[in-house]
Image (spheres, helix red, strand yellow):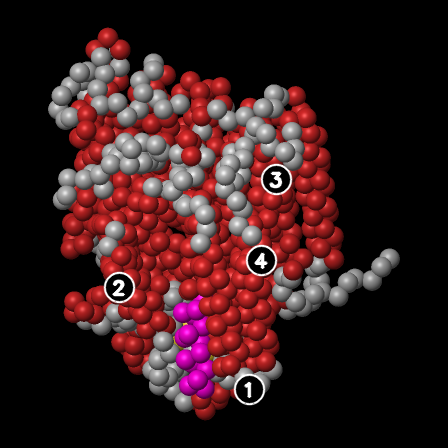
Amino acid sequence: MSDDRPATRTDTPSIDEAPATAEQMDALWADPPGLFGRLMAVQNDAIGKRLLYVGFFFLVLGGSVDSLVMRLQLAVPENDFISPELYNELFTNHGSVTMFLVILPITEGFAILLLPFLLGSREMPFPRLGAYSFFTYLMGGLFYYSSTLFQLVPDAGWTAYTPLSLTQYSPDLALDFWVLGLSVAEVAAIAAGIEIIISILKFRAPGMTLARLPLFAWAMLVTAFMIVFAFTTLVVGSFLLEMSRSFDMRFFDPESGGSSLLWQHLFWIFGHPEVYIQFLPAAGVVSMVIPVFMRRKIAGYPWLVAAFVAIGFMSFALWAHHMFSVGLPPIVSDFFSAASIAIGIPAGVQIFAWLATMWVGRPIWKTPMLFVVGFLVTFVIGGITGVMVASAPFDLQAHDSYFVVAHLHYVLIGGVAFPIFAAAYFWLPKFTGRLLDERLGKINFWLMFVGLNVTFFPMHIAGLLGMPRRIYTYDEESGWGIYNMISTIGAFVLFGGILVFGVNLLYSRYRGRLAGANPWGADTLEWSVPSPPANQGYSVPPIVRSRHPLWDQDDLHTGDPRLVRFLHALSEWPLKWRAAIVTGTNDGQPEEVIRVSGPSIWPFVAACGTVLLFIAEMIHVIAMIGVSTVVIIGAVVLWNRPEPVPTTDEEEEAFEREHGIPVRTDGGRTLATWGMGLSLMVAGIAFSTFLLSYFYLRVENEAWPPAGVEVPGLGLAIVHCAAVVVAAGIMASARRSVASGSFTGLTGGLVSAGLLTVFGGGVLLFELTHLDFTAQEHAYGSIYYCLAGFLLAVALIGLVVDGVVIGAAVQGRFTRRRHAAVENAARYWAALAAMWVIGSAALYLMPRLS
Amino acid sequence: MSSTPEPSRRPAGTSHWAVLLAGPVVATTYFFIVYLFAEASCADEWVLVGPSTLRVVVLAATAAAAAVLVTYAWRARALWRADDATTDASADERDRRDNRRFMLVVGALLLSMFLAFTVFLAAPAVGGSLC
């Protein structure tokens, strides 16, 4: 590695393209034309751009217009420009939309758009999952916004604290729109997160070791794991809230053994990492932009990677610093206070690494760099006020005041939005083929930088003077008027900056300078392909031998001769299906050639089914719940069904023999393993969240179960646990047999495991229908039914998986080489059995032990 | 003088991954244990533990977590030394070694950051009020 050598190279190494096959590949990887074709589209370019466009649309709608109306209302004391009810709806909408529908989809959009080019791969690993993620996000956002049409706009704040968000104080469907609409978007975020993780770990150019991974990819890897953990927790929290609203369950009712703080815990276990989920991609962008515009390799690459990982983990240990004022035990407050201050260590490491790079660099003051410098200034200010509110005594004074509003906007606009704009100016030319206008870009930056500081700096003072957040007006005697007037002026300046960006996008789309392949003289792989790139990205996948391939390598196709032959062969075969390389997690060496899935309507259908399910729950139409469940299951089965392979086994085996790399036209074992592993991780996190809620409620109650309620007997519990454990054993045995080449009894084993699971689930269901307590009387009953219901739901999904695998077994699809589905079924049952036993222990044993 | 060890031809293995992830995993586990223990200790009528044992448990857990973190740091040092550079290694082998060493460096940085995190977190248990 040669990080100590200043980089001066700005020309671009050549890309080998065989024109004839490149043209064929472009057609092979293209999405179908027309409206129906757009609904079937799976290309990362299309999905990434759509996420960006819709994210910016929601930014203007909920991020900007709402805030301008609120600022007009607050500009002068005792104003009656809008009603208090509308003000409540506006601040709820502003927070919810920006946190759920703007920043995250934009950062995930950039990731899906960029990662294949940045990593030297042809596509994302699960293009159809990406399409599903986009449609669920879009429909979830529209579902949420449709509340306006029914004049049922949520008004309980973006945090939806209980009891305000329960039916007692929010009796109409407004909060249901909030819970369910945003839950759909959360499902979309988790799906995209899984796709991003596997893409970064397994879809890289040969030679791209972990030590050579671009920093944006490192940042997105940590972010994607955080999304999976944090959003799954929130989905469970939202489920408990919706069960409380729709079915009168008692999780958050203190008079029936519940706790309103349980919602706050679940919300902030998501909510605080969410800030870093938004910040880390921004840090990744900054780490990519600074070296390019400083003409200097990044200083402290391993330090930055360590800082990203540390922030990812530490951010899950901070949530209760939002709850200092609720009466936590002093030692607990102190833990969270200490943890909140400690995260300043990795955050500071990042700042110093960026400053060190700038210190020795030669700056080129283009618009992306201006936004990055603006980021550094404002993020440091936001970070310092963050350390202030991490201190419990100070936070008790500043809590729910405009000081906090100022702090979070410095962090989210300066620390997140500025890098997003930098990324737009930096990377969009790669995909549009035209540079954004520099003069408009500089006007855009200065309006936003000045606007941000004029808007939010006075809020620190207003907050310290005692102005609470979420008030629609204030008295003239309060002395807050001047600060609010300045803030309102600043908000319009800030909005002017966003408008200039929109104008720049439109202007540059038609009049912008042609970008060329590498307009910035940048160092990473995406700049080696034409702007805009071909559908397949790389006809001949590149070989990476440096962290900065375009600065350090003379060309991207030199390396081990066998590897070079393999990569060139891959540009000529197969030309009938979409081939991509799966590489080793840490050494980046090719492991498999796999077939990436193509366009399909089923992700769109599955997304429609998902939204329909949530709508059905909201309006309590049981038949519609059934129909939408069938639609989802059917669509997912159909999108995953094996498709005919347009090449023969002989062709595949000849390629394997020649190059020593397995060809997997069924999708590949590696992806199947990772996909199932991450899906089980999501299930495990959801299960852990139910368990955490169970234990929290247990600790909150002196008697568990409440007086007069009998703990269910152990007899039936032993029976259903045994059935599921034996089913898992049969699955494991089937997996071992298939791996050793024996297919005798495979179908019988799969059927037996399914029947045993049906039996175990039936016993649990029988017990649930004969209990002497209900889910509506006490929090004990509520969490009991939900935890048991979760186990049944996981078993039901397993039975669908089992049905698909049985179908494939009956058709004789499995061979000694190709049986990933059987392996995955065995893994699923192992996880199911583990959750079943642990969950049953909590339900049946814990009340007896404590 | 001992002979130069043979350069390893394998990619980063379990030990390297363990060093890389030990810091965050140990510290996060430690955090949740002491947090849940503190919540349980301060809850009314909780039968298993009480405030009196909380301080001792937090400090003992801190010492244990710190010991594990230091042990892994030592392990990182040993792996680094065992993977000494040789001048005649092939380009592929140099790539693999660079990657292994990168994982050790990042692992060591994480171990030090999380050691600071762990010790800092325990400070309130030394003299602060508990419940």
- Type of residue at label 1? Thr
Q: Is residue A463 magenta?
A: no
List the residue tagged with mark 1: A744
**Residue at image location 31% in from the left, 18% down from the top:** A467
How many marks on residues? 4
List the residue tagged with mark 3: A850
Please provide the residue range marked out in magenta. A798-812
**Marks 1 and 2, the one that precedes in the sequence:** 2
Mark 4 burial class by Cα count in 10 Å: few <14, some 14-19, many 20+: few
Question: What secondary structure prevails in the magenta region?
Answer: helix
Picture coordinates of residue A405 (x, y %)?
33, 27
List the residue tagged with mark 4: A715
Whole-number angstrom distance, CA of label 4 to CA of label 1: 35 Å
Mark 1 burial class by Cα count in 10 Å: few <14, some 14-19, many 20+: few
Q: Are marks 4 and 2 in contact (CB under 8 Å)?
A: no
Q: Chain of mark 4?
A: A
Whole-number angstrom distance, CA of label 4 to CA of label 3: 20 Å
**Marks 1 and 3, the one that precedes in the sequence:** 1
Picture coordinates of residue A205 (x, y %)?
46, 66
Q: Are marks 3 and 2 in contact (CB under 8 Å)?
A: no
